[in-house]
Image (tube, rainbow, N blue to C red):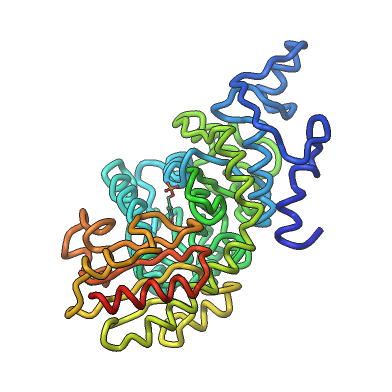
């Protein structure tokens, strides 16, 4: 089976399921018992595979991990309770005091907040404009161990120089982490640009229904961990391509405990079956709404969407991604009242979050970028009138009608 959706909907059965079930059932047992104590010890020591305790392993979660590994064409995945837990735990497990990270400056706001906290704990993070590899190269120091980027940044939709950063990381032996949340493995697989590890917030497109939290890190098998100084001797058994992900599970997940529950894994798996169907519709809706907004010359000052010709990385988007995604943002003209405009929307929900089946709108400067202050907002190019839209799967005519009447009323 080669097709993206065929693989997802049949992945549980490939590993054999109890009673011939077609879904992996929800296993809610925390611990797993063994008739033979020596077998229990062999599983603990990693000599045999198996289940011990739910903070690190659970059969329902494993089934989801295998599904994500297949979607990303990787070699192993570890799931977490949220996307932030996946990012934080990965970095804690792999980095040490004195290490340095180069990160895109255009990041999900909570990731920026996390990296600023890390900077207080012993490892430095330099933020650069990663739409050009030269800025990444210029920020490297002898202590740099990792480069971290997102694919399409929210809210302004900048696209990182993914291919060239991959080449740079390979040359310098750096861990290359790509947060693939906004594109999802349906639109883009970071293995194609030489990434080492892929982060996905499962809360967004992969689950898709806005009713479950989860995160994942996937090892793509391209990084040589035998040359990386921070792997503990305990995790150096077997192929060196797996040492990093083993340390993330055995040290990171065990120590920090941000495990995904079996019920959440089940809900995410169910949502993931329709990832391609939902995203095709959401991306088509985003393209249509972006073009509609571009035509509102007396209501809209700028539209940011990589599917528009005016977007500075439109060519890169075409080369790398199946489609330009389902997030866009736009600046309302100053003569319009942002609150009156938003409050006039009837179909579109005023809410944070991304990747829901429902279309969501949020005023950026006053909410998700409020805490960082005006100076940072200016550096990030976030105007007071910027509105971010996460497109859902509604019928496009209803969305256009909703926006039209909101413009008429503001
Ligand atoms: C939402 C998001 C996260 C964090 O995921 P949570 O599941 O909300 O913790 C990380 N990165 C990106 C790009 C996101 O959009």
Left or right: where 1 falls relative to 369: right
Number of labelled discs?
0
Nearest to the observer: residue 212 or residue 191? 212
Q: Is residue 34 visible?
A: yes
Q: Is residue 333 above or below residue 108?
A: below
Q: Position of residue 321 (x, y in %)?
A: 57, 72
Which corner quadrant holds the C terminus?
bottom left
Left or right: where 253 falls relative to 266: left
> Residue 275 lies in what quarter of the image?
bottom right
Q: Position of residue 351 (x, y in %)?
A: 34, 55
Q: Is residue 174 visible?
A: no
The residue positioned 46% from the left and 29% from the top of the image is: 255
Q: Position of residue 161 (x, y in %)?
A: 47, 73
Left or right: where 237 falls relative to 195: right
Left or right: where 303 falls relative to 149: left
Which corner quadrant holds the N terminus?
bottom right
Q: Is residue 370 above or below residue 233?
A: below
The residue positioned 56% from the left and 80% from the top of the image is: 318
Q: Position of residue 104 (x, y in %)?
A: 38, 63
The residue positioned 39% from the left and 53% from the top of the image is: 143
Nearest to the observer: residue 286 or residue 220? 286
> Residue 96 lies in what quarter of the image?
top left
> Residue 338 lies in what quarter of the image?
bottom left
The residue positioned 47% from the left and 30% from the top of the image is: 257
């Amino acid at each position: 089976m080669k097709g993206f959706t065929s693989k997802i909907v049949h992945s549980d059965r490939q590993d054999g399921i109890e009673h011939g079930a077609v879904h992996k059932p929800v296993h809610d047992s925390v611990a797993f018992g063994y008739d033979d104590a020596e077998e229990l010890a062999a599983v603990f020591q990693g000599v045999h595979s198996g289940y011990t305790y739910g903070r690190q392993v659970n059969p329902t979660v494993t089934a989801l991990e295998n599904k994500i590994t297949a979607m990303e064409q990787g070699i192993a995945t570890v799931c977490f309770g949220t996307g932030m837990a996946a990012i934080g735990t990965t970095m804690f497990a792999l980095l040490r005091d004195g290490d340095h990270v180069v990160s895109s400056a255009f990041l999900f706001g909570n990731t920026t907040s996390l990296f600023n906290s890390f900077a207080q704990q012993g490892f430095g993070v330099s933020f650069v404009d990663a739409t050009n590899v030269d800025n990444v190269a210029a920020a490297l120091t002898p202590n740099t161990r990792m480069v971290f980027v997102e694919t399409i940044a929210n809210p302004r939709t900048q696209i990182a120089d993914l291919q060239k950063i991959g080449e740079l990381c390979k040359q310098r032996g750096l861990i290359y982490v790509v947060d693939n949340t906004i594109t999802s493995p349906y639109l883009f697989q970071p293995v194609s640009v030489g990434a080492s590890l892929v982060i996905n917030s499962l809360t967004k497109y992969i689950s898709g229904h806005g009713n479950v939290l989860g995160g994942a890190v996937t090892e793509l098998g391209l990084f040589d961990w035998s040359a990386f100084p921070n792997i503990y001797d305990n995790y150096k058994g077997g192929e060196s391509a797996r040492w990093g992900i083993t340390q993330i599970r055995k040290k990171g997940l065990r120590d920090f405990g941000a495990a995904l529950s079996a019920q959440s894994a089940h809900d995410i798996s169910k949502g993931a079956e329709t990832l391609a169907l939902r995203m095709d519709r959401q991306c088509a809706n985003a393209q249509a709404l972006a073009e509609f907004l571009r035509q509102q010359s007396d209501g809209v000052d700028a539209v940011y969407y990589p599917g528009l010709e005016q977007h500075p990385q439109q060519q890169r988007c075409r080369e790398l991604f199946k489609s330009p995604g389902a997030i866009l943002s736009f600046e309302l003209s100053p003569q319009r009242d942002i609150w009156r405009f938003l409050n006039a929307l009837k179909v579109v929900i005023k809410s944070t979050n991304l990747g829901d089946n429902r279309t969501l709108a949020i005023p950026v400067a006053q909410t998700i970028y409020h805490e960082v202050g005006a100076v940072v907002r200016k550096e990030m190019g976030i105007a007071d009138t910027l509105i971010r839209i996460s497109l859902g799967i509604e019928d496009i005519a209803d969305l256009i009608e909703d926006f039209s009447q909101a413009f008429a009323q503001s």
